[in-house]
Image (cartoon, helix red, strand yellow):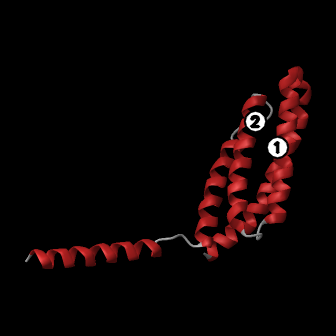
Amino acid sequence: MSRWRVIVGVATAATLLAGCGEAQTSPEDDLCVRYDLLTHQVSVLADLDPTVADADDLSDSAEQVEDQLDALQAVAEGQLDARISALRTSLGDLVDAADAAGHGALEATRPLLEDTVDDVNEAWAALEQVADVKCAEA
């Protein structure tokens, strides 16, 4: 009887291990997972009002969006490069403006912060439009 238990145990283990390879995420799914994470981080940034937000909060949030953008680009296989690049440029401008505001010129740079947040929102809308379609197809 114990011999059959060993055979059944080995067969069960082999079946379970074979299933592990099939559980991998497809590139399209991985793109959509990364896109969802990016969407969340962009919403956190969007919740910050540049007319009253602390410059460090804006900068930190923009950098977190950049981190998620890097993760998305790593799995996008070139499909979103132009839109990712535009968003990355806008985020860089926002970080630069927030850094300038953090050096004692916050009130003077509020209009610049507002403009750069608007640029980020426009670049995000362009990326969002294409990524929504790609993830709806997946």
Q: Which label sits in the foreground, 1 or 2?
A: 2
Instruction: Identify the amino acid type marked 2.
Output: Leu
* Residue that mark 1 sits on: 117
- From the top left corner, tell me how far across and down residue 46 is, in percent: 71, 44
Residue 87 visible in the displayed image = yes
Q: Foreground residue, 47 or 88?
A: 88
First along the sequence among labels 1 and 2: 2
Kindly state the secondary structure of the residue where label 2 is placed.
Answer: helix
Q: Foreground residue, 130 or 76?
A: 76
Kindly state the secondary structure of the residue where label 1 is placed.
Answer: helix
Residue 53 visible in the displayed image = no
Mark 1 neighbour density, 10 Å: few (under 14) some (14–19) many (20 or more): many
If the image is split into quadrants, where does the N terminus sit? bottom left
Instruction: Identify the amino acid type marked 1.
Output: Val
* Residue that mark 2 sits on: 58
Q: Is residue 42 above or below residue 55?
A: below
Displayed quadrant of residue 39: bottom right
Q: Is residue 96 above or below residue 39?
A: above
Q: Is residue 103 above or below residue 36?
A: above
Displayed quadrant of residue 109: top right
